[in-house]
Amino acid sequence: MATKINEYDTKRSKALKWGYLFAGVAFIVFVVFLGRIFFLQHNNVDTIEKNFISNNYREATLKAARGNLFAADGSILATTVMRYDAYIDFKTIKDTVYTNHIGELTDSLSKMFDKPRSAFRKIFDEQKKKENQYFSLIRGLDFDQYDRIKKFPIFSKMDKKTGKFKKNRCLIIERNFKRELATAQIGAGTIGMDNEIGKSGLEGAFSKFLKGTDGTRYEQRVNSSQWKPIDYWKVKEPIDGKDVYTTIDLRIQDIAHSALEKQLIHFEADHGSVLVMETETGKIRAMVNLRKEGKDEDVKYVDAYNYAIKDATEPGSTFKTVSLLAAMDDGFIDESTTVDVGNGRWKYFDQPMSDSHVKGNGIYDISDVLAESSNVGASKLITKYYGKDPQVFFNHLKKWKLFDKMQIELPGIVKPYILTPENTKWSKGGLASLSYGYSSRFSILQLTTFYNGIANKGKMVKPLFIEKIVKDGKIEYQAEPEVLVDKMASTEAIQLMTEMLTKTVEKGTAKSIFTPNIKLAGKTGTAKFEYWKSSGKYQAAFAGFFPADNPKYTCYVMINQPNTAIGYSGATVAAPIFKEIAGKVFLKTPLNVEKEMLVNKKVDLRKMMQPNVKVTVKSGVLPNMKGLMGKNVIPQLENQGYRVDYKGVGKIKNQFPDAGAVIHKKQRIYLELQN
């Protein structure tokens, strides 16, 4: 019995020794393993990442959709159209699935793209054999085509419970965005761009709101030159851009464009600009810039450069309004002031000046100086009261922000130039030259802002280009008028200047545009540049507001280098454009406008006056919107919280989802509008 116990103890002792030994070895191996992991984690991270991760995967940008740019009434100026590129990963398609369904797939593709199914089958068999992971099937699909192709056999599976299709991993979709201008024919330069070339116009001005935030996703290496996006492995979802509603009124923009283009063609001019500003708010309702391109029979005028803000130009006689308002505000001149212009010839130190004509005996009252655009009269008055101390005169210009570069959203605004005594080019005759529009240069936007201040009873407001910013149907920002100068001059001075500008149209240099139906106020301007040449070049301008007795809009017109054999003065070349714009803008008011003002081939007023039909998505059911004006429908859908993508302008031609479909707030609505 004792022997058996001893044998048991001996065996048990040996077993424990081997067990302890095994456990010890296992522990040592485990410690070594942990140590190796620790070592790798802290010493070979870069090597592992380089050899195994970085060589096969990378993080790539997932572009965000740029927001839409709207006119004030909701019409689309620029929109982002999404296009889809389809690729196939043959390696992920099981052999049995390929064999059983390839015929159905090629048949579907044959019907969609009108190509023989055999052509698809031959290429697919070759790529399947190669196990190509990134075969380019088709590029540039629109949404309807993409929605159709993703439901094809092999590319998707249908959930039997819900009846919905789920895209398979073998179909790889790349999204591409294309920016389209809906109204390129009446404002491509105004709308502008934001791309690799640069920024300009409204697109460049509001890019920080429109561009959104890009996301990221991973891509897998396919070969030495190709990377395959992994749709389901996204690091960060992109955030689409916000929608920006500009102040542009498409109807006024079209009227201004037509009027300017017609006059440029008639006078064979090099280029021209028109600005229309809403008096009370400073909102820019139209901004048109056209320049000549081509020669002879191929000449056309295109909106390719924004002269209204990017060029500083001599204002000519439109600056007399600035000069005389300063003297009125200081009390030097009033309605009883007279000046002797003699025979229309005068010299102030080294500065000779002349008038194109002299009225009566040459004794002008103050209103005649402006109405007859007398260079001699304006310079005599300004040098008389400011010749000894020009700084008093310049203080008015500083108060009216005429020395300052305008702080606006649009890129490229030019800084004004005014010759002052501090400048080495200043001479004793400098003030006389400045008083009637030379020795200074301003942007058309700056001059328009000044005239708008007079129209607004002395309150100068900042030019506005934005109405509001909208994200997912909710208004995030609403623009409000910003006052630059609360009171430009005394009430009496502003009133007198308004009367003088009205007289200029009724009896002065702009009497050719007088109409009893709309009370107009404004000033002609004719500036000669390259005057050292015998031929010289001219720039014609007209600045004013309407109706003069209750101003709603201020307008500045400029035409550069008209054919002098046809005409070159502000009264002949620029003023008729102002009259046409004023007449057509007020078509909706009960005024007896002359018949020639109603002629406008580009504006169909019946379309503009279509009633705003109410559109409501009840219980998530999408109504039939075909035939309705997009500008009326789109804001209503967005205000109800739906995200809408568009293409084109005008009436709705197609919609997706179709009428009667049940949609949720996160689902997008796609509308195709007539162009």
Image (cartoon, helix red, strand yellow):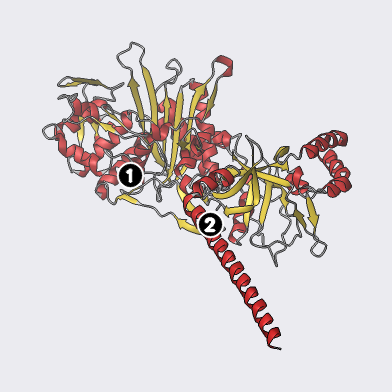
- Residue 378 seen in the figure: yes
Q: Position of residue 236 (x, y in %)?
A: 56, 54
In this view, 54 is above or below 570: below
**Identity of the amino acid at label 1?**
Ile
Query: From the viewer's perspective, is 672 left or right of 469?
Result: right
> Mark 2 falls on what kind of element?
helix
3D distance between C-alphas at marks 1 and 2: 80 Å
Q: In the rendered view of the protein, which quadrant contains the N terminus? A: bottom right
Query: Toward the viewer: 601 or 297?
Result: 297
Q: Up-down: is 674 above or below 9?
A: above
Residue drawn at point x = 58 percent, y = 38 percent:
183
Extreme-left residue of the structure: 388
- Residue neighbourhood size for the residue with mark 2, other residues' Cα within 10 Å, grouped as few (<14), some (14–19), many (≥20): few
Residue 506 seen in the figure: no
**Which residue is label 2 attached to?**
37
Residue shown at 45%/56% (left/top)? 478
Mark 1, residue position: 454
